[in-house]
Image (spheres, rainbow, N blue to C red):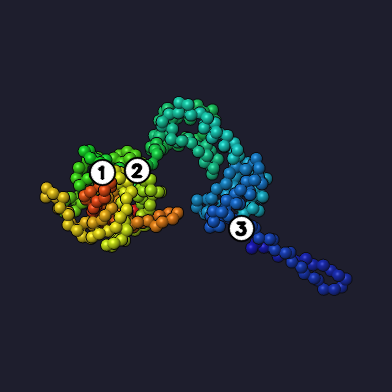
Amino acid sequence: MIRRPLRTLTVLVGAATAVTAFAAPASAAPSVLTETAGPATVAAAQQKIGTSLGATFAGSWLDTTTGELVVGTTDASRSSRIRAAGAIPKVLRRSAAELKQIQSTLDNKTAGLPGSVAGWYVDVPSNDVVVSVVAGDPAGLAWAASAGVPVRVEHVKSAPRPLWSVIGGQGLYFDGGACSVGFNAYDDDDHYVITAGHCTELGGTVRGDGGTIGKVARSSFPGNDYGTVKVTHSDVSTPPRVDRYEDGSDVRIEGADVVGVGGRICRSGITTHWHCGRVEALDQTVNYGNGNIVRGLTQTDACAEPGDSGGSFVSRPSSGSGTKLVQAQGMTSGGSGDCDEGGTTFFQPVKEVLDRYDLTLEKD
């Protein structure tokens, strides 16, 4: 609390003794709102202050060092109002409306926009509209200069691109064959797609439904039936999801707890999509012929067909609406029969490949 210096006021009342009085302390300054108050409280304060300032409002933001709410204004006389509302005032040149108008001018100037212009935005703390240009490309710089409005140019290393997801059960395409995505995983440095080993033994560059993913990293077949594809393209994301196709929205991977004999499971793949069944046996040795013997597989009565190989086996999701969380079980290996008459399908348990290659499963 700020106090004024104590002052003594002496009043003579006839021959009486002096009477001493003290000035009252000044009232405390209002506290400054910070991000610890929570998003809803901060947003409400920003809205209220912005409305009260009207045309003089120049934006608001949280100081990245202190977390304090800062409010800009083009009128210095409004500073006391801002302080009283619990924010730190900052006098700026352009109002929020002026900045928005500059941005709108750029939005309407997209004809002939060079690919090297990555975008533009309002930088509220600096009170500027910023145009992002890749590597200082001359065409991009010329476009920004020709806009006829005041902008600040920033140089960025690369242009943005749409991100696409690698999702369990969707297509995985090799030179010479097509399989399905099993699960996504990672280690300290990289991300990987896990699928069947008889798919990754094809080697080379691997594509997904949205483009190139990367190259085969490791492969184990026969004996086992698992392999990994290292994600090397920056536009690829690897969420913990499995596609249910026409049976519903994607399920999300919660863990990798094993479903035992008699338990319900489901599988996803590009050929026959989503089918469910039960576990019939664990740790089975399967002879695929031509010396291709695989050990440690799980037998199920869920059908599958060629192309479904490598696809996700998961615990059966609960019924009803809402987000479906499931446990990852393994990747489709092989089997007999089909999805018209039914059949037997085996999967390679996912825990083995995670342990073998020291990977962590992507989980919800």
- Residue 307 numbered mark, or none: 1
Quadrant containing the N terminus is: bottom right
Residue underneath mark 3: 31
Q: Toward the viewer: 78 or 256?
A: 256
Residue 104 placement: quadrant: top right
Q: Nearer the viewer, mark 3 or mark 1?
A: 1
Q: Is residue 27 left or right of residue 322?
A: right
Residue at 70%, 65% (x, y): give it. Answer: 6
Crowd band around label 2 with a 10 angstrom C-alpha radius: few (<14), some (14–19), many (20+): many
258 up-or-down from 235: above or below:
below
- Residue 292 numbered mark, or none: none
Q: Position of residue 297 (x, y in %)?
A: 21, 56
Label 2–label 1 contact, CB within 8 A: no
Q: Position of residue 299 (x, y in %)?
A: 23, 56
Q: Is residue 31 left or right of residue 64?
A: right
Q: Secondary structure at mark 1?
A: loop
Residue underneath mark 2: 236
Crowd band around label 3 with a 10 angstrom C-alpha radius: few (<14), some (14–19), many (20+): few
Distance from disc 2 to disc 3, alpha carbons, whole Å, reads: 46 Å
- Residue 206, can we see it? no
- Residue 170, can we see it? yes
Distance from disc 2 to disc 1, alpha carbons, whole Å, reads: 22 Å
Q: Amino acid at mark 1?
A: Gly
Q: Secondary structure at mark 2?
A: strand
Q: Secondary structure at mark 3?
A: loop
- Of mark 2 and mark 1, the one earlier in the sequence is 2
